[in-house]
């Protein structure tokens, strides 16, 4: 059964967890470089959850979460706080995880796919990772090195219509996270984990914009390929159940790499079962515009191709092609071009794509003050500078003067002046004579 002939449609959102690159853990001073460390060597009373130990938020992790929010065009909340998310698990000895619920650091935002489709983001928040259980025979061992690692959680809206779009989104996110130095996002080290939320609805529900009343969460997938496979598998599994008039249960499942199937882990608790409440040991946080502006400036000062291209396309609505062109010039022959583009975009009334076009194609428009730039653009708008239009006029003139064209071909070079005169008249004086003459020569000789 392929997706097209199926009467069911995929409903898919992603939850992505990623480790923040930081010197220390999220709420204590433990060294966060835990890779290859002996088990339980990067621990302290706070990340071991000993009674009386108090959490102190990691400023670097907070800034990096905001930075990611800036890059993904999120709304950054001026007021944020941490909340306790309660659940019991051996790798979470506090009995709760410090996370964010009502006031996450970032809300909204999106990543645009190559197809032009915008994948909307619900929220980005910061939390702590849990410890890691190792099962050996009938024993379970716990390593607390991972406990309290700073962890960003990004949740998308359930807007994906295919597994491959979800894969593209996750890959683009990884690229941005790395470009910003927010994290290494190494999937083999568990630094980037994807949890697709999958359900299935009928075509009619899709038309009415109705969402299913359940979702199946596939936990902690550490490969883009497996994620895409798991989504496809779940779509088939759930469609088949519905087709057979059976209910699909809300549950957590895992991906079995060897068998290429998803397997039941546990029936999912409802959100309210977590009994979220504000973390009393950490005061609410307030951020001002100066702080956010600094973050934005710092981000743009860094030479980050993916981020800079995205900023140009999102903030200034340039096409990706123009943005990439500006970027490549800025790294090569004209390093000031992006700064000038931003300056002119902010300080003049000229359309952004026009500014980019002129800076890219016409060196005489570079290195100007905004006012000079604007004046020069307005003057040149009176000139005919669309080459298409000029080409059309020249072709017309040549066609009407075939004899003169023949004369030129026979060596009567100064007859070009006559054609040029016709072109100038035809363009009502707006053509640039030098350019027009060059074009006429090319046409006649070509
Ligand atoms: Zn610690
Ligand atoms: Mn989480």
Image (tube, grey):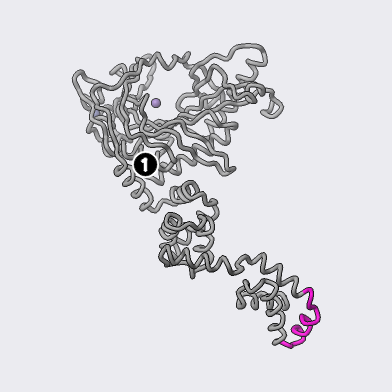
Picture quarter containing residue 270? Answer: top left
Within the displayed image, which quadrant is ligand 1 positioned in? top left
Question: Does the rendering let one see residue 43?
Answer: no
Instruction: Between residue 66 and residue 418, name the one nearer to us.
Output: 418
Picture quarter containing residue 422? Answer: bottom right
* SS at badge 1: helix
Question: Does the rendering let one see residue 396?
Answer: yes
Residue 200 in the image: x percent, y percent?
A: 60, 22
Direction right: furthest residue:
403
* Horizontal relation, residue 251 to residue 19: left or right: right
Q: Residue at x 49, y 37 (%)?
A: 170
Is 405 included in the stretch rendered in magenta? Answer: yes
Direction top: furthest residue:
246
With respect to residue 128, does 290 lie above or below? below
Is 430 included in the stretch rendered in magenta? Answer: no
Residue 332 in the image: x percent, y percent?
A: 45, 63
* Magenta stretch, main secondary structure class: helix
Q: Name the residue under label 1.
A: 67
Direction left: furthest residue:
52
Instruction: Between residue 314 and residue 115, name the one nearer to us.
Output: 314
Q: CB of residue at label 1: within 8 Å of ligand 2?
A: no
Please tell me how crowded label 1 is: few (under 14), some (14-19), or many (20+) other residues with Cα within 10 Å.
many
The quarter of the picture where the N terminus appears is top right
With respect to residue 166, does 410 lie above or below? below
Instruction: Between residue 57 and residue 42, name the one nearer to us.
Output: 57
With respect to residue 341, does 427 lie above or below? below
Instruction: Between residue 436 and residue 178, name the one nearer to us.
Output: 436
- Residue extent of the magenta highlight: 399-413
Residue 12 in the image: x percent, y percent?
A: 55, 27
Residue 409 in the image: x percent, y percent?
A: 76, 83
With respect to residue 77, does 411 lie above or below? below
The quarter of the picture where the C terminus appears is bottom right
């Amino acid at each position: 059964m392929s997706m097209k002939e199926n009467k069911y449609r995929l409903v898919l959102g992603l939850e992505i967890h990623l480790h923040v690159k930081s010197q220390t853990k999220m709420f204590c001073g433990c060294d966060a470089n835990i890779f290859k460390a002996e088990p339980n060597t990067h621990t302290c009373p706070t990340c071991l959850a000993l009674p009386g130990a108090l959490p102190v938020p990691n400023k670097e992790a907070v800034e990096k979460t905001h930075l990611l929010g800036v890059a993904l065009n999120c709304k950054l909340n001026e007021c944020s706080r941490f909340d306790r998310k309660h659940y019991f698990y051996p790798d979470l000895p506090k009995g709760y995880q410090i996370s964010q619920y009502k006031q996450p650091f970032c809300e909204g935002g999106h990543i645009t796919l190559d197809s032009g489709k915008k994948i909307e983001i619900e929220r980005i928040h910061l939390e702590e990772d849990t410890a890691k259980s190792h099962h050996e025979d009938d024993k379970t061992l716990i390593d607390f090195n991972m406990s309290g690692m700073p962890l960003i959680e990004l949740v998308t809206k359930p807007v994906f219509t295919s597994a491959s779009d979800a894969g593209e989104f996750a890959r683009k996110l990884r690229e941005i996270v790395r470009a910003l130095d927010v994290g290494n996002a190494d999937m083999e080290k568990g630094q980037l984990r994807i949890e697709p939320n999958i359900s299935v609805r009928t075509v009619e529900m899709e038309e009415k914009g109705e969402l299913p009343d359940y979702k199946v969460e596939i936990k902690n997938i550490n490969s883009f390929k497996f994620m895409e496979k798991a989504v496809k598998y779940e779509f088939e599994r759930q469609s088949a159940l519905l087709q057979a008039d059976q209910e699909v249960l809300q549950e957590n499942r895992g991906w079995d790499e060897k068998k290429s199937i998803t397997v039941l882990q546990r029936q999912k608790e409802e959100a309210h079962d977590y009994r979220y409440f504000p973390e009393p040991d950490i005061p609410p946080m307030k951020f001002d515009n100066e702080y956010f502006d600094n973050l934005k400036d710092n981000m743009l000062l860094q030479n980050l191709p993916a981020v800079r291209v995205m900023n140009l396309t999102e903030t200034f609505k340039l096409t990706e092609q123009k943005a990439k062109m500006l970027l490549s010039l800025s790294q090569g022959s004209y390093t000031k071009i992006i700064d000038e583009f931003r300056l002119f975009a902010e300080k003049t009334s000229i359309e952004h794509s026009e500014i980019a076009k002129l800076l890219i194609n016409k060196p005489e428009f570079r290195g100007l003050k905004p006012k000079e730039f604007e004046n020069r653009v307005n003057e040149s708008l009176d000139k005919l500078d669309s080459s298409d239009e000029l080409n059309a006029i020249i072709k017309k003139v040549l066609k009407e003067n075939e004899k003169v064209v023949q004369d030129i071909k026979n060596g009567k070079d100064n007859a070009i002046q006559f054609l040029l005169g016709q072109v100038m008249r035809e363009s009502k004086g707006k053509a640039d004579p030098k350019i027009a003459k060059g074009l006429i020569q090319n046409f006649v000789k070509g």
